[in-house]
């Protein structure tokens, strides 16, 4: 029997799409092993576990959380997001997010682009710091969404502290990135089935303890793109708990508490005024410790 049919037999109130979503998000295991796909074959005596994530509140609540505002006009606001802050509410993170903070700072943002993720057109990982631009008007939302979708008029540059001794000082990675075939909570470089991902990188400076300051300019915005690409080069981002090497992290002083990745520069055309704009977020203190 197919896994999704077996789950449907015990959870008749679930739709096929919800079952598939739970499997893709890593909430289903078979005999203690995370399920890979809805169509996998299971036997009658297999132990199937389904974890039901808590529901996300339909409308995020405003919260008085300080924001580091880099730029603001009537159409957009640019924030230097601290490491540790989640961009929008999700299972396990119902509050304390950038969206909760923005709704307190800008109550009028509530109806821009939908109530769940108002104004949000792109994201940063929870433990990645740096620049994120948010739409304050519907026209800006439309313009930013198009720009970030086609990747042609947005230039995003990150700084990363990476382990390893690179054979080259710069390069361009172009391949496919998609969900890991076994661990659905991770991303991976795939031969087929993923989405095109392009990262241009160069070593800015070699540092102590075998780490390097690396500049990464991305032409696409895939989930965990830089982290996956640098790990594929044998140069994982220091402090990365998913794609990194903890043994190498422990050799650093201080031992990094998060992935040392920072969204440093953001260059694009203003979505309403149609003029070029560029923003820079200073290197955070935890990364300065290694420079």
Image (cartoon, rainbow, N blue to C red):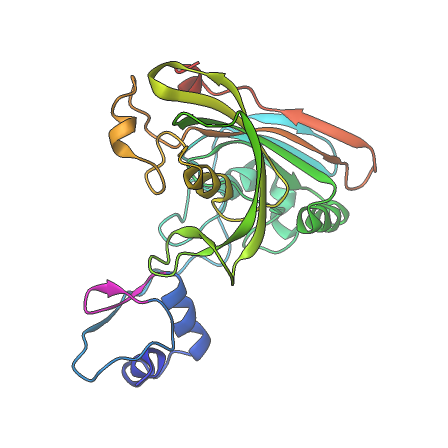
Judging depth in this view, the residue of 90 and 215 nearest the camera is 215
Query: Could you tell me residue 90's position as x and y percent?
Result: 43, 52
Q: Quadrant of the N terminus?
A: bottom left
When asked about the image quadrant of residue 23, the answer is bottom left
Query: Could you tell me residue 217's position as x and y percent?
Result: 60, 33
Judging depth in this view, the residue of 90 and 58 nearest the camera is 90
When asked about the image quadrant of residue 96, the answer is top left
Whether residue 34 is situated above or below residue 103 in the rendered picture: below
Q: Quadrant of the C terminus?
A: top left
Query: Could you tell me residue 228's position as x and y percent?
Result: 45, 43
Seen as rendered, the residue at the extreme right is: 274
Q: As drawn, is 92 to the left or to the right of 129?
A: left
User: Would you say residue 201 is visible in this rendering?
Assistant: no
Q: How many marks?
A: 0
Tell me which residue sits at (63%, 32%) in the image: 78
Q: As drawn, is 29 to the left or to the right of 63?
A: left
Seen as rendered, the residue at the extreme left is: 45
Judging depth in this view, the residue of 268 and 52 nearest the camera is 268
- Examine the structure image and report whether residue 254 is included in the region drawn in magenta: no
Tell me which residue sits at (67%, 46%) in the image: 148
- Please give the range of residues in magenta: 26-35
Judging depth in this view, the residue of 172 and 41 nearest the camera is 172
When asked about the image quadrant of residue 270, the answer is top right
Tell me which residue sits at (61%, 45%) in the image: 220
Query: Could you tell me residue 172's position as x and y percent?
Result: 59, 37
User: Would you say residue 17 is visible in this rendering?
Assistant: yes
Tell me which residue sits at (73%, 51%) in the image: 142
């Amino acid at each position: 029997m197919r896994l999704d049919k077996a789950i449907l037999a015990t959870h008749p109130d679930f739709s096929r799409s919800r079952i598939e979503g739970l499997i893709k998000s890593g909430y289903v295991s078979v005999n203690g092993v995370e399920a890979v796909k809805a169509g996998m074959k299971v036997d009658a005596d297999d132990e199937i576990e389904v974890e039901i994530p808590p529901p996300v509140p339909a409308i995020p609540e405003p919260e008085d959380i300080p924001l580091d505002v880099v730029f603001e006009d009537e159409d957009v606001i640019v924030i230097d997001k601290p490491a540790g802050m989640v961009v929008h509410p999700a299972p396990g993170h119902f509050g304390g997010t950038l969206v909760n903070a923005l709704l307190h700072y800008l109550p009028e943002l509530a109806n821009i682009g939908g109530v769940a993720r108002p104004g949000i057109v792109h994201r940063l990982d929870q433990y990645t710091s740096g620049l994120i631009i948010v739409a304050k008007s519907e026209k800006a939302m439309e313009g930013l969404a198009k720009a970030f979708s086609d990747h042609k008029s947005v230039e995003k540059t990150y700084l990363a502290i990476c382990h390893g001794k690179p054979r080259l000082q710069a390069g361009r990675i172009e391949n496919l990135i998609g969900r890991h075939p076994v661990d659905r909570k991770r991303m991976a470089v795939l031969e087929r089935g993923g989405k095109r991902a392009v990262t241009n990188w160069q070593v800015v400076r070699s540092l102590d303890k075998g780490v390097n300051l690396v500049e990464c300019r991305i032409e696409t915005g895939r989930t965990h793109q830089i982290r996956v690409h640098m790990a594929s080069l044998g140069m994982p981002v220091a402090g990365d708990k998913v794609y990194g090497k903890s043994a190498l992290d422990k050799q650093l002083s201080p031992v990094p508490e998060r992935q040392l990745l920072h969204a440093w520069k953001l260059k694009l055309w203003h979505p309403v005024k149609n003029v070029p704009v560029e923003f820079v977020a200073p290197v955070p203190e935890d990364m300065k410790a290694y420079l």
